Amino acid sequence: MRLLDFMFDRTVGGLNKAMDLSWRRNQVVTANIANAETPKYRAGDLQFGKELEKAFGATSEQTLVKTDPKHLELSNESAAKISIDYSGITKADGNNVDIDQQMANLAQNSSDYAGAAQLMRHKLSLAKTAIRDSR
């Protein structure tokens, strides 16, 4: 296996997708925090586990014919959907945002994003080294 084949497997595309989805989840969580006092507001979350499995090749579902198993499936449609939480404790005004839970979600999501960004930096550093050393 060539070094470039090793570095640019599904990982780079999967990390890119993970960072994008984490960014989208951050928007949902910050909207929840911003609306913590809005009457009848329901907290939401972005569910994207299946989309990450697909990006990293963990599922066997293939909707497109690929010419190479390393090719990523690119689609404008996202399997990541915002789910509204209708469970949990609702305040008298109909709002169910638990600010402590949302702050924990924000911290976890920030950590997930930072981890994916670190892995991406490492992959790109490997590519830079391979290019520099090939001269």
Image (spheres, grey):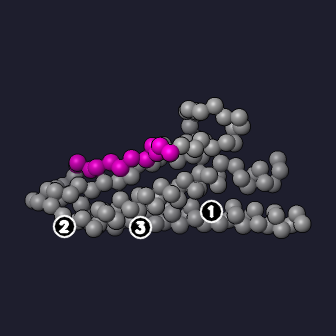
Question: On screen, 62 above or below 56?
Answer: above
Describe residue 100's horizontal placement relative to residue 105 as left or right: left
As helix, strand or loop, the secondary structure at mark 1 comes to: helix
Residue type, mark 1 in image? Leu
- Where residue 101 sits in the image (x, y, percent)? 31, 62
Closer to the observer: label 2 or label 3?
Answer: 2
Describe residue 88's horizontal placement relative to residue 135 as left or right: left
The majority secondary structure of the magenta stretch comes to loop
Quick one: label 2 or label 3, which is nearer the N terminus? 2
Q: CA distance from mark 3 to mark 1?
A: 19 Å
Q: Please identify the quadrant where the C terminus is shown.
A: bottom right
Q: Which residues are magenta?
A: 76-87
Residue type, mark 2 in image? Glu
The residue shown at (65%, 66%) is 121
Question: On screen, 83 above or below 120?
Answer: above
Residue of label 1: 119
Quarter holding residue 117: bottom right
Residue of label 2: 37
The residue shown at (50%, 45%) is 76
- Circles 3 and 1: CB distance less than 8 Å? no
Residue of label 3: 107
Quick one: label 2 or label 1, which is nearer the N terminus? 2
- Where residue 60 sits in the image (x, y, percent)? 58, 33
Describe residue 84's horizontal placement relative to residue 111 as left or right: left
Question: On screen, 120 above or below 75?
Answer: below
Q: CA distance from mark 2 to mark 3?
A: 21 Å
As helix, strand or loop, the secondary structure at mark 3 comes to: helix
- Where residue 52 sits in the image (x, y, percent)? 52, 47
**Closer to the camera, 116 or 20?**
20
**Closer to the camera, 126 or 88?**
126
As helix, strand or loop, the secondary structure at mark 2 comes to: loop
Mark 1 surroundings: few (<14), some (14-19) or many (≥20) residues within 10 A: some
